Amino acid sequence: MPYTDQISFTTRCLITACVGVVFALPLRAETHSDAAKPNIVLILADDLGFNQIGAYGDTPIKTPHLDQLARNGIRFTNAYSGNTVCSPSRVSLLTGRDGRLLHDNSNKVQLRDIDVTIAHVLKYAGYDTALFGKYSVGSQMGVTDPLAMGFDTWYGMYSILEGHRQYPQFLWRDGRKIRIAENEGGRKGAYAQELFADKAIDYIAQQHQNPFFVMLNFSSPHAELAAPEEFVAPYRKIFDETPYSGMSTGEPADKYAWYYPEPVDQPRATLAGMVTALDAYIGRIVERLRKQGIADNTLILFTSDNGPHDEGGGDPEFFKAAAPYRGMKRDLFDGGIHVPMIIHWPARIRTGRVDDTPWAFADVLPTFAELAGVSLTAVPRVQTNGISIDRRLSDSPQPIGERMLYWEFGKQAGDPNSGIVGEVFQAAREGRWKAVRYGLDQPTQIYDLESDPGERMDLSNQRPDLHQKFQELFETYAR
């Protein structure tokens, strides 16, 4: 076995079996019957901006299936990711913790063996659990890989660097590395996002005795920029294009070219095609749920791990990808963390609506726990500072009180946009008020998001009371 340097296959199976027993203990709320528990499909895009799907604005990118989910479900307009970069955002999502509780807020953070994930929690409610696509937050096979972190099965990319390739030469299936022969020798025959969707569809098509939780983590539209021609072709000749040269000239096209060396002749058309491809694959998943007769009581949550990127020829300014917000990936202005969030659940959401409730990735775990009937007080080692928004998920939503949301981004070596290694950015939101501090020795800025969603007018001098409140918060949690 290729990974037996760390642990033997036999030992690993025993560990996985023991973990499965522990997390299958029947700690369920009496008010929820198995028949009433929804299937859950959590779909995560990679570096998709708030304004890059039709339901959220004026993008030229076509996303008819997501737009339909939004029309028939809840389109949240004040939803936030867990961080402005991949790994801490995903750890926040999986564990229900924001930057105040994460042990590391840089992009090198990984899950620890003591962490409890959404998949672990849903095992308490008798769910079958599966992960497809990008993982990137487990550092040791048999200890923090998906099987060890609550998933019954997984297929996809394990490390963060694997997620940089749209036509990978290998993927992972349940801890085993498998060849993708169609992509060997420079060929591009198997598109990663389609492979992930196909495996998810195959899983949904199986006969399940239990409700299921599917986590589908696309690694797109994150660079590298590439997609099947059928999705790129409709956008060719639409946009003015500047080719991205990568490393083809012998000199890097930009600071990311070492990660993305291949040239792209029409990067704008390609990125648009990548998003439309994701939309098409999501449409196929919805259709499979309908064919299985389980669409009504399946909750679909679609979102993105952070704001849009400018890597490998990406051009977020051209697409107004984060509009109307300021910034992009690696920023803690809203452009880096304010993400699309759509929930579709016909059994409880019969009339589509727009919801402006502020909430974030840390709230997903407690929300899923509540709708599955799991009391988190009965789950050993679970640690979350999120809250359940289950009360919003109906046609008669109940209010959620104002509370403090918090983000922290620690820059680290190895990130081309890292700046000063060890530099810490912080942001917080309470109600309409947002605070941002770009460095521990930098001033705290205050913004009124209701009147100034683009965070252009710093009100720290006009509101010293808010400035002091947020400053004290930042000093408390700064690391």
Image (cartoon, grey):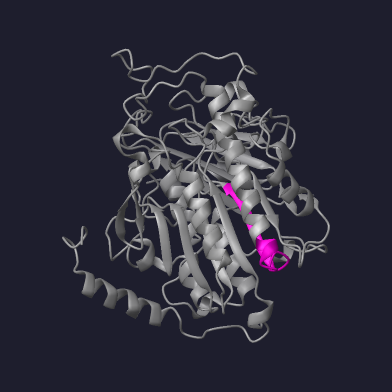
Question: How far across and how far down the image is residue 75, in percent?
Answer: 73, 48
- Foreground pick, 128 / 390: 128
Q: Quadrant of residue 54?
A: top right
Is any part of residue 367 visible from this angle? no
Q: Quadrant of residue 300?
A: bottom right
What range of the chain is rendered magenta?
289-303
Image-based side of 32 in relation to 132, left or right = right
Image-based side of 358 in relation to 229, left or right = right
- Foreground pick, 410 / 367: 367
At 51% from the left and 86% from the top, the residue drawn is 26
Quadrant of the frame with the N terminus:
bottom left
Image-based side of 105 in relation to 309, left or right = left
Question: How far across and how far down the image is residue 242, in percent?
Answer: 51, 13
Is any part of residue 5 visible from this angle? yes
Q: Is residue 273 above or below residue 472?
A: above
Image-based side of 168 in relation to 279, left or right = left
At 67% from the left and 56% from the top, the residue drawn is 287
Q: Residue furthest left?
A: 5
Question: How far across and how far down the image is residue 391, in percent?
Answer: 72, 66
At 39% from the left and 38% from the top, the residue drawn is 165
Question: How far across and how far down the image is residue 317, in percent?
Answer: 58, 22
Q: Is residue 436 above or below residue 175?
A: above
